[in-house]
Image: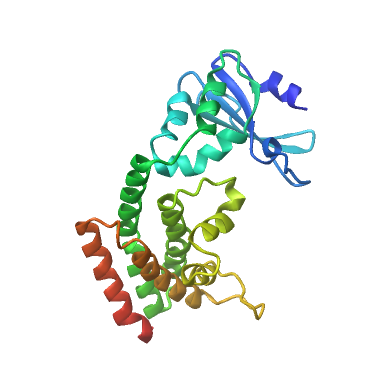
């Protein structure tokens, strides 16, 4: 199968073709798709067959990146956490110049150093400020029982805050499906942060019942406060002032909503 895919998708302008995801890791199941990554010479959108294909009954997803985009994984923490583990486990299908092999070798010895942590802290601080708008949407949504605002807020106060901690803790994801469990493990499976996060995501409790939308959003607001505590030592003064004011706003209003 992979020989046929290589023959189809490796074409002029593609410097390397690699298999990533579950088939590369060796843990593919009956419903897994085949993820192919094309390293392009120029614009990553140049491959005419980028996108999804149904081939012999299997979903094949072709994505394209440039070498510059791969290089960014070694300097930008928000990209490193998404890409490094995948680069390590990728299976090379075609790489005549050894370009991807060199990138993969670097990924396999990649170390999350103090420079990367400093950048990760800055990213987390900026994101905490960025998600303040969702706090306001959450409070307004709870006050007015506005489903639209509640849904927007729920996303930011669950996925968004999880992403903040993923980057700040340097969680190099094994794959998209590992996001929930791997971030939980990094912060602490039995931590209050993870307990609130579970509710914010709408996951059922020990009673087997899933929380309703308002309960999820209330948990998300509490999760914002808990995240602020965890990040208090790394927030610069300007960010800390905004985050602290937001925490005060939540504490002042949440009980009445």
Q: Is residue 129 above or below residue 192?
A: above
Residue 233 image-quadrant placement: bottom left
Residue 156 lies, in percent from the top left, at: 43, 61
Q: In terms of depth relative to the viewer, which is nearer, 213 or 125?
A: 125
Q: Is residue 159 above or below residue 13?
A: below
Q: How many marks?
A: 0
Residue 182 lies, in percent from the top left, at: 56, 55
Residue 72 image-quadrant placement: top left
- Residue most toward the bottom? 256
Residue 211 lies, in percent from the top left, at: 56, 76
Residue 71 shown left or right of residue 205 in the figure: left
Residue 46 shown left or right of residue 57 in the figure: left
Residue 162 lies, in percent from the top left, at: 46, 58
> Looking at the figure, which quarter contains the C terminus?
bottom left
Q: In terms of depth relative to the viewer, which is nearer, 70 or 106?
A: 106
- Residue at 47 percent of width and 25 percent of height: 66
Query: Which scheme is used to colour this image of the protein?
Result: rainbow
Q: In terms of depth relative to the viewer, which is nearer, 234 or 160?
A: 234
> Looking at the figure, which quarter contains the N terminus?
top right
């Amino acid at each position: 199968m992979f020989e046929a895919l290589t023959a189809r998708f490796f074409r002029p302008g593609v410097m390397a073709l690699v298999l990533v995801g579950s088939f590369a890791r060796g843990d593919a199941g009956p419903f897994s798709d085949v993820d192919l990554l094309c390293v392009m010479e120029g614009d990553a959108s140049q491959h005419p067959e980028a996108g999804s294909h149904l081939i012999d009954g299997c979903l094949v997803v072709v994505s394209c990146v440039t070498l510059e985009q791969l290089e960014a994984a070694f300097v930008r923490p928000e990209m490193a956490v998404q890409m490094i583990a995948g680069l390590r486990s990728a299976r090379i299908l075609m790489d005549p110049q050894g370009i991807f092999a060199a990138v993969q070798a670097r990924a396999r010895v990649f170390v999350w150093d103090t420079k990367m942590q400093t950048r990760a802290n800055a990213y987390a601080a900026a994101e905490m400020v960025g998600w303040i708008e969702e706090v306001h949407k959450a409070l307004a949504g709870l006050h007015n029982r506005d489903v639209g605002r509640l849904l927007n807020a729920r996303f930011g106060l669950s996925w968004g805050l999880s992403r903040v901690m993923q980057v700040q803790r340097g969680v190099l994801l094994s794959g998209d499906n590992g996001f929930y469990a791997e971030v939980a493990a990094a912060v602490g499976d039995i931590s209050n942060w993870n307990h609130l996060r579970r509710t914010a995501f709408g996951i059922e409790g020990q009673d087997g019942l899933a929380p309703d939308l308002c309960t999820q959003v209330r948990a998300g607001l509490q999760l914002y406060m808990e995240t602020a505590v965890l990040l208090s030592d790394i927030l610069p003064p300007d960010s800390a002032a905004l985050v602290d004011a937001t925490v005060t706003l939540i504490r002042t209003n949440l009980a009445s909503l």
